[in-house]
């Protein structure tokens, strides 16, 4: 038997069914790479005081003695496992076997589900059975469901059952039997939800159950775990928020009444229980998921959030939702690990009327105090990122605007990054943010050349004992948040960021190369090349990388930088870049990013027919200029840039249309037919014809011949702007 069990375990491992480490129970990581599921910082400096008191108590409270699986049952499940592994069972027969096997577990579900070996086979049965047997199993073990969910092995069984219910929901006829089963489970859960919420395994099962009741995908990371990189991108305006209505998850059939029942049951606790849930790590995960699921139901959100904040009043009145007696308690709770994560989500989802009151009653006059704290500063970041209007920004700036240097010295650069992003989103305090950051990095009597290097090496500079003697340290990794701040800075108007532009353009060539080789630094260079700084200054920076484009292109992060440099360059610099890529063409083509870069820069044509490559680049330049002269904003028309037109105008009336038209220009200029002559075509050519460069005769008129002749004569005007204008009007209509 021991040998059989051993071979069974090995077989399951081969099929990828072995258990993951308990670390898979992720928490809401926050926004710092040093944070982990149990606290904000990986160095262990933060320990949740109240949380630690309760962290392990649930184990003793929920200990449940179970019987071992009898040998006959173990042998039976081993035979089923071997049968399924043999792949000799068809789909219909498999469903019958799964149903029969589940019948054999009747009355023994707890023992079977929590057995480390047999639970694997039970998961397979729950995935392969019909909805009646699945619901029958869950109804039979309902009284033991919390114990199954809180077991290391049983939790996987419980989650598998919930996921299988979600799949069966696609069959409308199964809705009523699933609803009946879920009602039974929810009643059992709300009888004692606290232990389940505070268990590392049970909390994960409960979150899946909440998702099923809402009708969202159970595996959706949006509701279970929000990656730190995703939230940071949203806070810094690099990505639209998932809860701004533009990227709402697709819902399937749900059970709204059960969701409300489950939520009210979870929070229908004593005041003592609520205080425990506020500071418990795993309860925080459950409550974060619940809050995200309630987005769109402002009335329910309002009620739940006020309970979580410790408000005890029954009748809430607008403008007086939050009792003053709880304000100081909440400020202190924000400094606890678990509650700080929960508070970040509260600020993200809170209805505007409640957010305004939270802002003025809880956070006003406490922003710098909380920003100074290693947990509280993440909550302040969330508060700033979700500021609604300029009045709130006025209060934020009053407390934090004069404190940029203090925040950087304390290592709270995330607060400043959030403030910069909010100023851009709300279009206020933009110039003041730039000035305050520059003043924090460089004193009045110092040259502005130090600004960018010091922000790139943020912690290294601000932690140095003698800042006046600080110099660039080669080989040191650049600060992630520092590079993100600079990327955000270069999205400002050029008149606000002249010191930053000067600082980056006068950097020494070897420093520019070091920045380009660093993953974060490369994004800074790309942000500068995408800014509305003058083309002349951009080319000055690009020129400092001459002789190293081949080396950079071989790096996954550097290849995109090379592409950006190419786009920002004039003809001589473009030719220099492509010449360097020719020398590494063979090696570059074997990298993941190489084929795209070689194709984008047309390196193959340059190596074989350089004159034709130059002609095509010149043609593309003329087409871009003519297009933006005709359709771009007044800003583009008055541009004095003497190189290629590389920047999309900031105030263009139809930026998306311009972007799409530019792609179309690139596509048609890479074919044998000029773009402008195709603009008036009434139908699109077939894909096969596009690849070969051949087009049907009825899609070509006399304009093509004229355009080709003008292109060969290299005249400045193409004479096709009217056709292009007609094409744009046609697209808009």
Image (cartoon, helix red, strand yellow):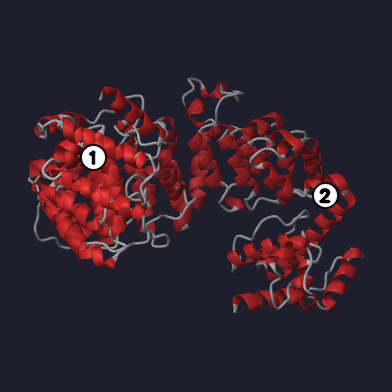
- The residue at which mark 2 appears reads as 605
Q: List x then y, in percent, for residue 182.
A: 18, 56
Q: Is residue 120 visible?
A: no
Residue at screen point 59% across, 41% down? 524
The answer to which image quadrant residue 165 occupies is bottom left
Which residue in the protein does label 1 denote? 155
Residue 202 pos. (x, y %)? 21, 40
Residue 388 higher or lower than 24, as above or below: below
Dot 2 falls on a residue whose secondary structure is: helix
The relative height of residue 218 versus residue 555 in the rendered view (above or below) is: below
Describe residue 29's horizontal placement relative to residue 542 as left or right: left
Residue 402 is left or right of residue 319, and the answer is right
Local crowd size for mark 1, using a 10 Å CA cut-off: few (<14), some (14–19), many (≥20)? many
Q: How many marks?
A: 2
Check the image and name the residue furthest to the front.
Answer: 88
User: Is residue 14 visible to the viewer in this orientation of the structure?
Assistant: yes
Q: Quadrant of the N terminus?
A: top left
Label 1 and label 2: CA atoms lie apart by 59 Å
The numbered disc on residue 267 is none
- Against 710, residue 528 (above or below) is above
Q: Residue furthest right?
A: 713
Report the front residue among 55 and 239: 55
**Closer to us: 298 or 510:** 298
Viewer-side residue, 661 vs 452: 661
State which quadrant residue 730 falls in.
Answer: bottom right
The residue lying at 72 percent from left, 61 percent from top is: 667
Q: Nearer the viewer, mark 1 or mark 2?
A: 1
Q: Residue at x 13, y 60 (%)?
A: 316
Query: Where's residue 137, x and y in %?
Result: 17, 49
């Amino acid at each position: 038997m021991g040998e059989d069990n051993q071979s069974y375990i090995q077989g399951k491992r081969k099929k990828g069914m072995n258990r993951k480490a308990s670390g898979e129970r992720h928490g809401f990581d926050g926004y710092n790479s040093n944070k982990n599921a149990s606290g904000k910082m990986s160095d262990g400096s933060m320990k949740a005081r109240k949380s630690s008191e309760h962290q392990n108590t649930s184990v003793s409270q929920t200990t449940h003695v179970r019987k071992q699986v009898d040998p006959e049952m173990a042998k039976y499940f081993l035979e089923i496992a071997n049968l399924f592994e043999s792949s000799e069972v068809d789909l219909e027969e498999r469903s019958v076997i799964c149903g029969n096997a589940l019948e054999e577990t009747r009355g023994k579900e707890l023992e079977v589900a929590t057995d480390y070996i047999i639970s694997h086979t039970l998961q397979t049965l729950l995935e392969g059975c019909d909805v009646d047997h699945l619901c029958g199993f869950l109804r039979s073990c309902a009284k033991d469901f919390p114990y199954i969910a809180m077991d290391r092995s049983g939790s996987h069984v419980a989650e598998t059952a919930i996921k299988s219910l979600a799949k069966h929901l696609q069959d409308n006829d199964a809705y009523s039997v699933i609803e009946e089963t879920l009602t039974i489970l929810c009643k059992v859960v709300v009888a004692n939800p606290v232990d389940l919420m505070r268990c590392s395994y049970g909390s994960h099962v409960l979150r899946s159950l909440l998702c099923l009741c809402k009708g969202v995908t159970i595996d959706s990371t949006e509701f279970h775990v929000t990656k730190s990189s995703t939230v940071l991108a949203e806070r810094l305006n690099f990505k639209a928020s998932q809860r701004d209505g533009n990227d709402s998850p697709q819902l399937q059939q749900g059970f709204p009444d059960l969701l409300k029942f489950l939520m009210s049951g979870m929070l229908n606790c004593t005041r003592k229980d609520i205080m425990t849930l506020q500071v418990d790590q795993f309860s925080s995960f459950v409550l974060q998921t619940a809050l995200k699921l309630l987005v769109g139901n402002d009335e329910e959100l309002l009620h739940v959030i006020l309970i979580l904040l410790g408000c005890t009043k029954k009748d809430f009145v607008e403008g007086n939702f939050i009792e003053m007696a709880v304000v100081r308690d909440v400020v202190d709770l924000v400094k606890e690990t678990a509650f700080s994560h929960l508070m970040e989500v509260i600020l993200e989802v809170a209805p505007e009327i409640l957010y305004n009151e939270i802002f003025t009653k809880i956070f006003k006059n406490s922003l710098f105090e909380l920003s100074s704290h290693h947990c509280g500063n993440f909550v302040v970041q969330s508060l700033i990122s979700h500021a609604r209007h300029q009045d709130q920004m006025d209060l934020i700036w009053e407390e934090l605007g004069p404190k940029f240097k203090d925040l950087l010295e304390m290592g709270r650069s995330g607060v400043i990054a959030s403030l910069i992003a909010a100023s851009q989103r709300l279009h206020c305090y933009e110039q003041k943010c730039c000035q305050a950051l520059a003043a924090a990095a460089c004193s009045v009597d110092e040259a502005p050349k130090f600004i960018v290097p010091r922000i790139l090496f943020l912690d290294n500079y601000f932690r140095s004992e003698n800042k006046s003697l600080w110099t660039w340290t080669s080989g040191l990794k650049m600060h992630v948040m520092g590079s993100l701040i600079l990327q955000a800075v270069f999205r400002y108007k050029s008149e606000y960021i002249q010191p930053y532009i000067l600082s980056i353009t006068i950097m020494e060539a070897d420093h520019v190369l070091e920045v380009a080789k660093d993953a974060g630094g490369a994004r800074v260079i790309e942000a500068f090349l995408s800014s509305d700084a003058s083309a002349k200054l951009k080319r000055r920076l690009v020129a400092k990388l001459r002789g190293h484009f081949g080396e950079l292109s071989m790096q996954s992060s550097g290849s995109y930088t090379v592409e950006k440099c190419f786009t920002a360059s004039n003809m001589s610099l473009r030719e220099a870049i492509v010449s360097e890529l020719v020398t590494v063409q063979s090696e570059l083509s074997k990298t993941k990013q190489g084929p795209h870069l070689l194709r984008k820069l047309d390196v193959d044509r340059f190596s074989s027919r350089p004159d034709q490559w130059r002609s095509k680049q010149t043609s593309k330049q003329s087409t871009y200029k003519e297009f933006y002269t005709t359709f771009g904003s007044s800003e583009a028309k008055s541009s004095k840039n003497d190189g290629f037109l590389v920047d999309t105008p900031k105030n263009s009336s139809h930026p998306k249309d311009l972007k799409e038209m530019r792609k179309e220009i690139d596509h048609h200029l890479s074919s044998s037919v000029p773009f402008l002559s195709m603009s008036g075509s009434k139908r699109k050519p077939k894909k096969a014809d596009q690849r070969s460069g051949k087009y049907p005769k009825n899609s070509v008129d006399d304009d093509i011949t004229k355009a080709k002749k003008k292109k060969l004569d290299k005249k400045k005007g193409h004479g096709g702007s009217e056709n292009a204008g007609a094409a744009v009007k046609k697209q808009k209509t």
